[in-house]
Every structure is written in C-alpha cells, then in structure tokens.
C-alpha cells in the first residue's frame, strides 16, 4: 500500500469516526485541531461551556416549572427526576462506555466530547416546553 493510500485511509477513518462522536459545531471544531494537545484544550473548553449552559438552562426551566405547581402535579419534581436520570445515563455512556478500559491517548478528548454532546442535546430538550414534550 502506498503512502498516499494510507493517508487517504487514515483521513477516511477520522471522517467516519468524528460525525458519530460529534454533531455540535464546536465539538467538531475541536476534532479538526491538528494535535492531540490542541484537541484536548479545545474540548475541555467546549465541555466546560456546555456544562455551564446546561446548568443555566436547567435552573431556568426548574424555576419556570415551580410556578406551575399544583396539589396533584409537581412539574419541578418531575424535571428534577428527569435531570438525575439524564446525568446517570450521560455519565455511564461517556465515562464508562467510551472512557472505560485502556483506549489510548485520545480517550480524554472523546470522553469530554461525549459529555459536551450529551449536554448540548439535553439543553435542546430542556428548551422545549415541558408540558409539550
């Protein structure tokens, strides 16, 4: 196999792996960085931003839900329960499935990308009115 064919094969492997790992533009941008160190620094910032945004959106949704409490139904309690279930799922999927075992030097980038991706997905879920989900 020629060097050119190997490079094409490697590029295709990255292109195939990256879309499955990232649909959010900021996450994709990190995967496009040249070095593992650049990817890790970028992904750490994206991961932190996603967590921060998720916290802000979650608190706003919870506050809104508390204004709609009734004796028969507590949307705030339901949202809290949903958030805890999401966090359990996200932590298992990203930390245990993707991050588990000995996967190599790029694992940290993939794990942080997974956390960020899941958080951005959850943000979109939370932005939908809870009584219309």
Image: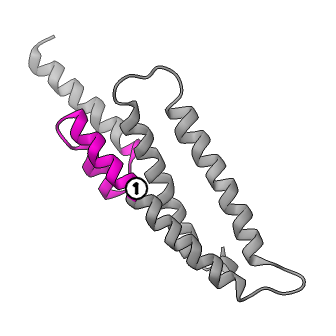
Picture layout, residue 45 above or below residue 79: above
Q: Nearer the viewer, residue 98 or 16?
A: 98
Picture layout, residue 50 above or below residue 62: above
Expressed as whole percent of the image width and height from the top left, the position of residue 7 reads 15, 24
Which image quadrant: the C terminus?
bottom right
Expressed as whole percent of the image width and height from the top left, the position of residue 5 reads 15, 20
Furthest residue toward right? 72
Expressed as whole percent of the image width and height from the top left, the position of residue 43 reads 33, 47
Q: Is residue 6 magenta?
A: no
How many neighbours does mark 1 have within 10 angstroms: few (below 14), some (14-19), or many (20 or more)?
some
In this picture, residue 126 sits left or right of residue 33: right
State which region is magenta. Answer: 19-48
Q: Quadrant of residue 107?
A: top left
Q: Residue at x 25, y 32 (%)?
A: 12
* Chief SS of the magenta region: helix
Picture layout, residue 33 above or below residue 77: above
How is the rendered protein coloured?
A: one colour
Q: Quadrant of residue 53?
A: bottom left
Q: Is residue 35 magenta?
A: yes
Q: Residue at x 84, y 80 (%)?
A: 73
Q: Residue at x 69, y 54 (%)?
A: 85
Q: Nearer the viewer, residue 12 or 70?
A: 70
Picture layout, residue 116 above or below residue 83: above
Which image quadrant: the N terminus?
top left
In this picture, residue 14 sits left or right of residue 119: left
Furthest residue toward top? 1
Q: Residue at x 43, y 23 (%)?
A: 103
In this picture, residue 56 sits left or right of residue 47: right
Residue at the spot of label 1: 48
Expressed as whole percent of the image width and height from the top left, the position of residue 10 reads 23, 26
Q: Considering the numbered disc 1 on the image, is that residue within a helix, a strand or a loop?
A: helix
């Amino acid at each position: 196999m020629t060097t050119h064919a190997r490079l094409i094969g490697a590029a295709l492997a990255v292109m195939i792996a990256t879309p499955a790992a990232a649909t959010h533009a900021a996450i994709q941008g990190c995967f496009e960085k040249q070095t593992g160190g650049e990817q890790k620094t970028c992904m750490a910032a994206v991961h932190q931003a996603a967590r921060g945004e998720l916290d802000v959106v979650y608190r706003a949704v919870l506050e809104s839900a508390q204004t709609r409490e009734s004796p028969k139904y507590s949307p705030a309690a339901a949202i809290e329960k949903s958030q805890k279930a999401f966090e359990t799922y996200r932590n298992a999927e990203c930390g245990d499935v993707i991050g588990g075992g000995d996967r190599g030097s790029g694992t940290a980038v993939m794990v942080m990308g997974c956390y960020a991706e899941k958080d951005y997905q959850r943000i979109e879920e939370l932005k939908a009115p809870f009584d219309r989900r």
